[in-house]
Amino acid sequence: MSIPNSDSTAQNRQNVVIHALTQLRQERKLNSQFQPTTQHKRLGTYSLTAEQTTPELQQQLDEFYAWMTVADPRFSQQVLVKPQTARARLEEVYRLLGWLFHVRGIALETLNLTQLVPFAPIKTAHRLVTSFEAARQIDQKAELAAERTLVMLNEHLYWRKEERGASAASRCLIVDRFIAIAKFLYREETNCLKGQPYNDVPTIVALRQAYREVKEAVKQEPRAIDTSLKWLPWEEYLEMVRHLKQECQLHYSYGKQRTPKAIARSVRRYLICAFFAYMPPDRQQTYRALQMGKTLVKGMFGADGFFKPDEAGLWHIRLASEEYKTGKTYGEQWRQVPEILYPEMESWLSQWRAVFKPKHDFFFTQEDGEPFIDASSFSGVIKHAAARITGKQLTSHLIRHMLVTYAQEQGASEATMHSLAEAMLHSKDMQEKVYDQRSKLNRIAPAQQFILDAAMGRKPSAAKAEKLSVEELNHAFWELSPQDQARFIRSVKLSPNNKKD
């Protein structure tokens, strides 16, 4: 009879304990530090892998990516998107191709985009025909391709909803990816001289209609995410940011010196969250892509209205139109960074950023020295900080909603709300966009002051309503809808000042 080795016995006990703890975590759903915000369960991946992608398919996907990101003078209808948007579309395309392979059983060697969106030449085919009958057949084939595309789309949407629990919003994105593929495949088949691009391509006309239908379903579907698990009142978010600032200490509360990496993490965490707290919060892409000397610059605006770089000046964020989501609408943007952030910004640049040995000139860096390349890694800093301090799974985009809600609850003036909308690069009325000739910095000044008042614990003051001239009032009246005009007339008639003695 063999005597068990004491080391192996200890190892066996350890394995039993680990197994028991793993089971307990699974039973109590403790595998994640975050409480689930949806009822959806994480399912296995079905996306096509790089190893499963043939050289021919990879070439087609490379051309698709180039079509989305690189201007081609041959195509006036081309609408370029940012690389991250193109990558997101490609990720969905890989899932669609994986579905063709894993679910529909299509062989890898035959996979290509036309199996998702069947192709039938239109303009290029019409140029070669000499008879009415041949032209009619071309149109019929194009319509048949559209019908086959809808069958493929609807089959996939049904599978994604029933088998993967895809929400209406997710299905909307899928239709959008189908449209992107169709525009690429039919890029030489639309005649822009005869009307709006792609209005003469039956497949894209059909997909656009499908998109509108799914978009309508989004309005009817209840939210898949429990926002209460993420939402913070604005005052609590500001308190969280102040707490993060206190964490940027050189020593622990019991006196021990903190490591440089721990301090660097704290300063970076505070700055990321503080940019959203002390300025009208922009989309995370703006802060994630801050680049010294390019989008984050020091200097002053001169009397001539031009920016002059100056190391003794103030920090500004400069965004070219191609560097943010709504740049085509609002053009170049400038934001002055409030001075409350300067001490930590300067210490980050002069000392703590270097701890991570960055290999780039972006303001923020990951711990491995690489830049933040996607939203999840950058927003994860906020999410983990909020979960630790408040128990909420806060996202960067939700911060924008939190501020607008706070402003409305505080009764912010119309001028402040308008300034806030412009500062956050929301859409605004064309009249205001055309006739307001003040500089962008002046127009968003009320929003900046509102943010700082809230951050410093001062009650935001509501600006007095501007008095309108008779001409301005008349112009504003005719800008109202007929229903609002009728409401206005009734309110004037019921006004105490309008009652007869």
Image (cartoon, grey):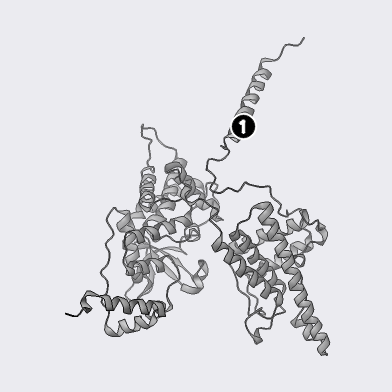
Residue 417: quadrant of the picture: bottom left
Query: Which quadrant is the C terminus positioned in?
Result: bottom left
Name the residue that disc number 1 marks.
Answer: 22
Please count the marks in the image: 1
Instruction: Give the vertical position of 75 relative to 99 (above or below).
Output: below
Residue count near mark 1 (Cα–Cα under 10 Å), binned few <14, some 14–19, many ≥20: few
**Viewer can see residue 48:** yes
- Residue that protrudes farthest toward the top in the picture: 1
Depicted 450 relative to depicted 498: above or below? above
Q: What element carries label 1?
A: helix
Query: What amino acid is found at the position of numbered circle 1 in the picture?
Result: Thr
Instruction: Give residue 399's position: percent from left, percent from top.
Output: 44, 56
Closest to the observer: 329 or 147?
147
Q: Position of residue 63 (x, y in %)?
A: 71, 68
Question: How far across and how far down the image is residue 109, in percent?
Answer: 82, 59
Give the image location of residue 372, x and y in percent: 54, 54
Which residue sits furthest front?
501
In the figure, 202 relative to 291: above or below?
A: below
Residue found 41% across the figure and 49% down from its top: 270
Query: Position of 287 compared to 205: left or right?
Result: left
The part of the image, by quadrant, that contains residue 497 is bottom left
Placement of the N terminus among the 4 image quadrants: top right
Specify the quadrant of the image occupied by residue 96.
bottom right
What residue appears at the point 43 percent right and 58 percent down from the top-left corner?
401
Which of 180/2 is in front?
180
